[in-house]
């Protein structure tokens, strides 16, 4: 029998790694002693990946900003970078694989060891998915087999056309509204939005907006915000692409550097290095035989199962958080940042209840110095899955000051990262032989058992589904009940 070929981006395995990034930080000689730590925020990213036979290694950095109150009453910040490295051992990993990952900050803990030394510990959750581009052979035309009943399913999936990876950098001087020099950057944050692409002439034009937001303090103790949205655009060479294909982009941060320029320039220098992977797919609808049997023949077949990416829309669960946080001694609101993570999962039938917390860091003016308050807001969502890899995106973050309350209006979108992958079954070998047994009955009475379907009953007795449906006056999609009596004609 002739075989067809599918070129697919096959999901091979997924791994979740929990690691602790920690280190002791010495206060630079140019900064005063520490009295109290006010807050710590961090930006983790992986700058190097390597897949080898049976092993995946990743190296990363965590840029941390430690805000503290000094012995002379000033607000200061220590900016430092801690590195981390780990290895995933798995016999299924090989050098041809690609990865997609997500890094989640679970907790941040900072302690004063003495007035010149700080201990920092950040717990990270890293969710990895491993993929390999494979050409899979299968038999899709079984019409030449006579006297065979087939259970078929229409599957819509994405077949690989091409993929390519490039490196690109964003360099931008973000203006500040100050006449005095910046002393420290207190926190930095980046996000990507408006990602789009255009395909033509064996190239893909990728576009995205990078939003940069920073909080800083000047040499005289004045707190300020600056932000900018910077577009990035790249041409990626891709053979055989058409404007009817599907293009998916994956942006990985490989390096970040934020540094105040001179007082005269009134800017902060920002450099962000990305690795951009472009994957182009073609939508394909195919009929796959899930099961089959012969009426007057014995049919044996070999079937393989693979997990593939489909064109199904990824379902998300929206969670709204409306909370008033009391902040004592607040004069004005400088900035708010937040992160969210899942803390517990309780299986419930086909899905699970997910409990999580949204960690909100509020930066405010006390009248004397910068104040920082951290609050954890719990939330819950029910999802139709059991995976531990839940991606959480903030679709709305709005904060305002009402007397001493910070009014939080937050919207989260929870998405299981495995939801647009489907296990399909492909037949790659079929054998048939004539039946040697002779049937000596014309009709039997069968009582439906738990788990029975019309297809399974027809297969077991080697009759057609239509014969059971017509003999028992059933509908094509009829539900049969346990204990129900069926007449089966041979």
Image (cartoon, rainbow, N blue to C red):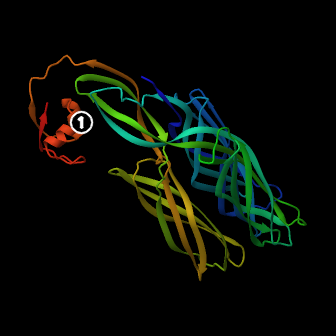
Q: Residue furthest top?
A: 436
Q: Which residue was labeled with disc 1? A: 456
Vertical order, 71 against 489 (above or below): below
Q: Residue furthest bottom?
A: 403
The number of callouts visible is: 1
Disc 1 element = helix
Q: Position of residue 186 (x, y in %)?
A: 72, 63
Considering the image in quadrants, where does the C terminus appear? Answer: top left
Vertical order, 49 against 361 (above or below): above
Q: Which residue is drawn at 72% across and 42% down?
A: 166
Quarter occupied by residue 240: top right
Q: 25 or 154: nearer the eye?
A: 154
Q: Is residue 80 visible?
A: yes
Is 276 left or right of 465, judged from the image as shown? right
Vertical order, 116 against 48 (above or below): below
Q: 485 or 107: nearer the eye?
A: 485
Q: Residue at x 72, y 77 (%)?
A: 368
Q: Where is residue 479 in the image (x, y as percent from the top left)?
A: 21, 48
Q: Can residue 71 be seen in this view?
A: no
Considering the image in quadrants, where does the N terminus appear? Answer: top left
Q: 117 or 178: nearer the eye?
A: 178
Q: Where is residue 377 in the image (x, y as percent from the top left)?
A: 50, 66
Is 148 left or right of 345, judged from the image as shown? left
Vertical order, 317 against 461 (above or below): below
Crowding near the residue tagged with mark 1, few <14, some 14–19, many ≥20 C-alpha atoms within 10 Å: few
Quarter occupied by residue 174: bottom right
Q: Where is residue 393 in the image (x, y as percent from the top left)?
A: 55, 58
């Amino acid at each position: 029998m002739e075989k067809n070929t599918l070129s697919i981006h096959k999901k091979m395995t997924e791994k979740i790694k929990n690691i602790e990034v920690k280190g002791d930080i010495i206060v630079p000689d140019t900064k005063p002693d520490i009295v109290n730590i006010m807050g710590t925020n961090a930006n983790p990213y992986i700058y190097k990946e390597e897949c080898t036979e049976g092993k995946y290694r990743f190296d990363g950095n965590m840029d941390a900003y430690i805000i503290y109150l000094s012995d002379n009453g000033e607000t200061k910040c220590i900016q430092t970078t801690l590195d981390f490295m780990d290895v995933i051992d798995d016999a299924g990993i090989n050098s041809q694989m690609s990865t997609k990952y997500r890094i989640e900050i679970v907790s941040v803990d900072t302690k004063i060891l003495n007035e010149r030394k700080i201990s920092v510990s950040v717990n990270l959750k890293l969710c990895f998915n491993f993929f390999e581009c494979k050409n899979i052979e299968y038999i899709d035309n079984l019409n030449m087999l006579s006297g065979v009943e087939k259970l078929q399913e229409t599957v819509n999936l994405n077949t690989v056309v091409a993929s390519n990876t490039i490196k690109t950098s964003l360099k931008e001087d973000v203006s500040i509204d100050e006449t005095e020099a910046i002393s420290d950057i207190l926190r930095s944050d980046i996000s990507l939005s408006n990602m789009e692409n255009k395909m033509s002439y064996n190239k893909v034009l990728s576009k995205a907006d990078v939003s940069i937001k920073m909080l800083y303090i000047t040499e005289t103790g004045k707190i300020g915000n600056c932000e900018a949205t910077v577009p990035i655009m790249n041409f990626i060479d891709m053979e055989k692409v058409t404007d009817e294909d599907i293009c998916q982009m994956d942006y990985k941060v490989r390096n970040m550097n934020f540094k105040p320029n001179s007082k005269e320039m009134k800017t902060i220098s920002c450099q962000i290095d990305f690795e951009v992977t472009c994957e182009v797919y073609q939508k394909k609808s195919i009929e796959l035989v899930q099961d089959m049997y012969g009426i007057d023949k014995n049919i044996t077949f070999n079937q393989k199962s693979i997990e593939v990416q489909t064109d199904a829309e990824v379902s998300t669960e929206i969670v709204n958080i409306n909370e008033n946080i009391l902040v004592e001694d607040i004069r004005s609101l400088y900035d708010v940042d937040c992160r969210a993570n899942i803390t517990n999962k309780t299986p419930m039938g086909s899905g699970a209840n997910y409990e999580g917390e949204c960690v909100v860091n509020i930066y405010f003016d006390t009248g004397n110095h910068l104040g920082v308050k951290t609050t954890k807001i719990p939330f819950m969502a029910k999802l139709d899955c059991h995976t531990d890899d839940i991606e959480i995106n903030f679709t709305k973050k709005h904060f305002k000051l009402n007397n001493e309350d910070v009014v939080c209006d937050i919207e989260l979108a929870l998405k299981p990262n495995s939801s647009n992958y489907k296990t399909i079954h492909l037949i790659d070998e079929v054998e048939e032989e004539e039946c040697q047994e002779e049937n000596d009955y014309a009709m039997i009475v069968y009582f439906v058992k738990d788990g029975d379907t019309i297809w399974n009953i027809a297969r077991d007795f080697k009759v057609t589904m239509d014969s059971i449906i017509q003999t028992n006056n059933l509908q094509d999609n009829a539900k049969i009940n346990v204990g129900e009596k069926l007449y089966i004609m041979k």
